[in-house]
Amino acid sequence: MLSAVREIGERVIKEEGKETISVLVDEKISDKEYKVLSILVDPLQKKFEGIDLEDFDSEKTLRYLFRGVFRKGVTSGANPTPAANINPKEPHKTLEGKVKGWFNKYADQRILRILTEKEKVFLQKVKEVLEKESDTILKDLKVKITELSKKEGKILTIKIKQEEKWNYLGDFEVFKKILLATESNVDNASSVTTCSICGEMNLVSPDAGVFKFYTIDKPGFITGGFQESLSWKNFPLCPDCKLDLEEGKRFLESMLAYKFYGLQYILIPRLLSGTEEIFKEIINIFVTSKKTVSLQDKVKRRITNDESEILDLLAEEKDVLTLDFLFLSKEQSAERILLLIEEVFPSRLKRIFEAKDKVDSIFDERFNFGCIREFFSKSDKNKRNYDLNKYFLEIIDGVFKGRQLDFKFLTNFYMLKIRKEFINDGYYRPVTKRALMDTIFFYDLNLITFEEVIVLEEELLGNLFKDYHSVFASPIKKGIFLLGSLTEMLLRKQWKARSAKPFMKSLKGLKMDEGDIRALLPKVQNKFEEYDSFDKGKRLLAKEIADYLLKAGDGWNFSVDEINFYFACGMNLVDKVLPVIYPEGIQDPDVIEQENQVEEE
């Protein structure tokens, strides 16, 4: 994965003709407005000339020379340049720790070995002014801060007078030189060895933490007897590769980061073969398509909740590239890999969209991964955090990589949600529908399998189950499904007659076992008889159910969740059953009226 990120960074730098230093500076502070407060220092006259105030200007990125103020998240000690985000309540800490602290840190360290004598003298003069005028600088800084809105961000930096002109940090080569040296750790590199990315012999950096999921501040991450000085052995990274990784990460986070139902992923393309022009074409698809994909018909082909998703376009590409999906969790300044799905080919994406299209055609509704997320987000809706992320991502990994899923495991979570809605008399029908959509989707991708049943005689219900493949292939499943439909008809009848559904108690909150299902059929028949509503169509359906249950025999070897899932599916799809048992049109007015009432409710 890191090799792919590094390659992208290298190509972007080359394509855009970027200076090396531009990779290291922050191009954007944040979405809110920022003010830049500059300490005016005249080193020649050894004077402090006041605090200059201006709006942040993105065109001056290289001149500001901000690094680590926001993107890298330095929270203690000096930043790689004497510039920092001001804490309005404690401006003295910013001045002492981030600005003066920078000069204190680099004035006496080995880093000065790369500087000329003239540059050393220059830095020393600036440092002396800051030390001498420290109290006055702080006093003026506090006054300026009180004049600004609390909603505005505030940045503290330095402007230095040279030849009657005020210059920014980036106008001086000495600050650029130190920034490059500190970020690549050239002066402090521990050894010359093989870089783990490019494979070339070079100085390697002891700080390879471009991504924040790599760290050397914990003993468990350090080889060589837990000595931090030997941390380079964990992940030897040369300065050039580190800069390429920086630019690659920046490009990916700005252009190829997507939302994913409360999570985020970064899409990382890898070119398997081809020329530089093919790579440019692929990158162009990402960059331009993300901006326009939400227009016109492209929305119809999304499988996530991100309007800028472009997976359908990538599905049309040839298998000259693969895609990595990097799911990251960002917690303060740390990052944690939740899931890395590697080497997904465009042909696999195409197959996923074909399965989606199949589900869409069956249910006349757009399927997306939100149908899966519904059952794998929170075990309890009152929980603050998504505690089922692990299971959700395992399923998504299975979808992209073609790994088998356990149907019993899936039905556990299906029924967890369906039961809650059913018991509370909520919207269990659409929830059940989405569970069935998930199941058809997984089945079409061969992620779950069902037993194949050879039909030796024409079934009375004809093609009722044809659209659902083998999901309802066995006599057990068909019998349970149809019993669910017959029971739903009874509940509608009761609501019509009594504005209540007392028979729901017999369903045990959808926790019925094999014995309960067998005993339910005569109960449903008797209730229909009591209402004088056991007509020809219902009798025909009851007979079919009895035949299926007899063929199923004893000892179904189905979990309670599986049994009740098929039963709930039958309740949900009762409107598919009615035209079959009433071929001339639905004859029971109670069913029609109740159906309308349900829609109105």
Image: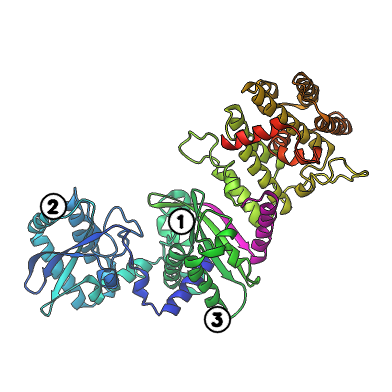
Q: Amino acid at mark 3?
A: Glu
Which sits earlier in the primary sequence, circle 3 or circle 1?
Answer: 1
Dominant secondary structure of the residues highlighted in magenta in the image: helix
Q: CA distance from mark 2 to mark 1?
A: 40 Å
- For the record, the magenta segment spans 338-366
Q: Which of the two discs, 2 and 1, labels the residue nearer the N terminus?
A: 2
What label sits on residue 277 in the rendered view? Answer: 3
Earlier residue among tags 3 and 2: 2
Side of 591 where 54 appears, left or right: left
Going by the picture, which residue comes out furthest to the top? Answer: 530
| Residue 314 lies in the magenta-colored region | no
Residue 564 against residue 351 in the figure, above or below: above
Q: Which residue sits furthest right?
A: 456
Tell me the number on the disc at residue 214.
Answer: 1
Q: Amino acid at mark 1?
A: Tyr
In three-dimensional space, the C-alpha distance between marks 3 and 1, rounded to whole angstroms, equals 33 Å
The residue pinned by badge 2 equals: 146
Residue 344 falls within the magenta-colored stretch: yes
Residue 110 image point, x, y percent: 28, 67
Residue closer to the observer: 236 or 75: 75
Q: Quadrant of the C terminus?
A: top right
Q: CA distance from mark 3 to mark 2?
A: 54 Å
Indicate the quadrant where residue 423 lies.
Answer: top right
Between 192 and 264, the one nearer to me in the picture: 264
